[in-house]
Image: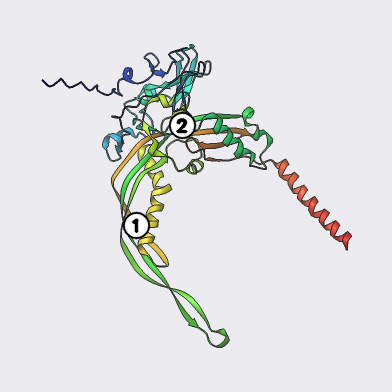
Amino acid sequence: MVPPRAAVPSPPDPADPDQRPGQYHVTEKTRTFPCANCGDGLEFDPVSGALRCPSCNSSRPIERDPRRQVGEHDLRDPRVAALATPRGLLSRDDPAAADEHEVICQNCGGRTVFTGTLTATRCPYCASSIQRDDVHQAPETIPVDGVVPFGVGDDQARANIEAWINSRWFAPSEFKKYRQFGSFSSVYFSFFAYSATAYTDYHGQRGDNYTVTVGSGDNQHTETRIRWRSASGRVVDDFRDVPALVNTGVDPERVEQLKPWPIDRAQPFTGEYLAGHLARTYDVGPEDGFGIARREEIDPTIEHTIRRDIGGDHQRIASSTSSFDPLRFRYLLMPIWLLTVVYGGKPFQVYINGVTGEVQGDRPYSAVKIAAAVITVLTLIALVVVAYRMSQ
């Protein structure tokens, strides 16, 4: 007799709030992750990759379902276009679309205000991690497909930021005292990662160098000239997971310099990775995000391919037209440590890649330190001149 086959349990339904990790609070439509030992809020620890309690130091691993994969969306899908509202988040008639949304902390009863696209934060009274389920699961919002978890912990991030600040010679002393004057936070920012095959038809010219001898006698010499001829053709480029930042209020050039992003480490979305950290949903829709990806990486790569296809010593590109098929994207949350220091009434921000530890940012200059350095240099020059004259 053949024994009955064991039933395979079905995976949790992400649309059912009661089946997602953490404790769901129906009245506030929020989610927390209480510690089973002491009741304090668990936080995602980048060093261990598990949830850790800051009070009793107990930990709980994040369970990963091998059947779940990081999904993708077709950019040309009409349903995706319908979700890409001009506001970039939610339709105006959705209650979750308010610029300010107040919730009651289920741990201490204090009131916490979510502003803009913020979806995960801490209670200002008891530091409990709170997440807005009504945004992440809103029917008018593109669902998050995956998370690249933090890999750089608080201690390492502070060591990296202090090394970066201390290497800035003319930074004001107040800027170097960022622990007292700055805000240092771990934030998951929203990115769309695009995958596509690009077919590009181009027209241009190929230039080949050649030399001629001109002049006569003592004036005879060779000159390099260019022989141009028409060139045209089609090139094909494959792109995989080209990331585009789709949040506003940060310096996109500095964030661009944090590349590369290890997108291959992305895990299927679960709010457990966000526990204890800030998170934002997208401000820019997927169509505009694709424009950012084209400007930053896709179009420059296509231009390089065209020039290589034309060949020769010089290339001129008169026109090019690209079509993309397929064209898909994934909605990912990427980890960034963010330092903001206000100096002279102006905010300065420094960013750390939450996986690689790369640091990029802006800092102010101290007029006093620059003036002191100039005076020191001039004094040294004057002393050298005096010493030289005395030796003569």
**In the figure, is residue 297 to the left or right of 181?**
left
**In the figure, is residue 152 to the left or right of 20?**
right
Nearest the camera: 81 or 228? 228
At x 30%, y 29%, the residue is 66
Residue at the disc numbered 1:
320
Q: Position of residue 201 (x, y in %)?
A: 30, 57
At x 41%, y 30%, the residue is 281
Q: Where's the N terminus, which quadrant?
A: top left
The numbered mark at residue 359 is none
Q: Position of residue 122 (x, y in %)?
A: 49, 21
At x 15%, y 20%, the residue is 3
Q: Position of residue 307 (x, y in %)?
A: 39, 61
Tell me if residue 99 can be seen: no
Please rate how many residues cluster around mark 2, counting C-alpha atoms within 10 Å: few if below 14, some from 14 to 19, many from 20. many
Helix, strand or loop at mark 2: loop
Residue at the farthest bottom position: 217
Residue at the disc numbered 2:
150
The numbered mark, 1 or 2, whose residue comes first in the sequence reads: 2
